[in-house]
């Protein structure tokens, strides 16, 4: 493997699981990149979070969506799980006031090894993290079990790999929607946000119930 390939792989790994000095740089990029902020705010808006909701985000990264979720769930609680210890610390600092108030809880973990929760959730969000999950349908079934009846889930994805296009995003949306149906979600739909360098898709579903 050449130096360029090694360098590229090292950079990509920092966005997957930030750590060390490189992870701090990746955190800064993710927190300040305009498209990241637009993508997260848009996905949160699609979830229609209510003031008293309990919300879970898987893979919260720099904590942009966590802050937006807490802005809506003013009387509820927002729980975040991320597999990077560095990001747990950085996102905790960005959301320090809400953490101190007990409205935000950020924990170390991942979709394959979620911590125990003391109550079900009304909303679940994941942005650009499903592609890292082992057996996504199995994970989605587990997340469905964490939702209240008629609770909502949103999975957003913006492809950024070499050669990615809006068509790449559209195909990914179709695949994720199929995963939702297999996992037992109802009212599945795909929303699209025109953004650069590629479009963002967000697949939404509802946990069955009365």
Image (tube, helix red, strand yellow):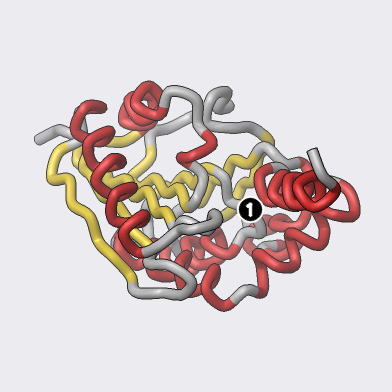
Question: Looking at the picture, does residue 94 appear above or below residue 143?
Answer: below
In depth, the one of 187 and 210 nearer the eye is 187
Residue position marked by numbered label 1 in the rendering? 61
Residue 117 shown left or right of residue 188 in the figure:
right
The outermost residue toward the front is 2
| Screen quadrant of the C terminus | top left
Residue 112 shown left or right of residue 205 in the figure:
right
Question: What residue is drawn where x is 31% and y is 59%?
Answer: 167
Question: What residue is drawn where x is 36% and y is 30%?
Answer: 140
Q: Residue 3's spot in the image, x, y percent?
A: 85, 48
- Asked where in the image residue 147 lies, by quadrant, the reply is top left
Question: Looking at the picture, does residue 160 appear above or below residue 109?
Answer: below
Q: Residue 9's spot in the image, x, y percent?
A: 73, 45
| Screen quadrant of the N terminus | top right
The answer, for residue 116, to whether it is visible in the render is no
The answer, for residue 155, to whether it is visible in the render is yes
Q: Residue 27's spot in the image, x, y percent?
A: 73, 60
């Amino acid at each position: 493997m050449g130096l360029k390939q090694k360098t590229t792989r090292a950079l990509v790994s920092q966005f997957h699981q930030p750590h060390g000095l490189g992870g701090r740089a990746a955190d800064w990029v993710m927190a300040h990149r305009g498209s990241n902020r637009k993508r997260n705010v848009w996905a949160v808006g699609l979830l229609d979070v209510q003031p008293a909701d309990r919300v879970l985000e898987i893979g919260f990264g720099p904590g942009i969506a966590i802050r937006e979720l807490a802005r809506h769930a003013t009387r509820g609680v927002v729980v975040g799980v991320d597999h990077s210890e560095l990001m747990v610390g950085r996102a905790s600092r960005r959301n320090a006031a809400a953490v101190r108030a007990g409205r935000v809880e950020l924990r170390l973990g991942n979709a394959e090894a979620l911590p125990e929760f003391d109550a079900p959730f009304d909303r679940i969000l994941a942005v650009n993290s499903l592609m890292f999950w082992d057996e996504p349908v199995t994970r989605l079934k587990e997340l469905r079990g964490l939702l209240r009846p008629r609770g909502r889930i949103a999975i957003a994805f913006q492809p950024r790999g070499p050669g990615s296009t809006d068509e790449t995003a559209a195909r990914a949306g179709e695949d994720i929607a199929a995963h939702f149906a297999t996992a037992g979600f109802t009212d599945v739909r795909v929303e699209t946000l025109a953004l650069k360098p590629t479009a963002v898709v967000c697949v939404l579903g509802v946990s069955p119930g009365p």
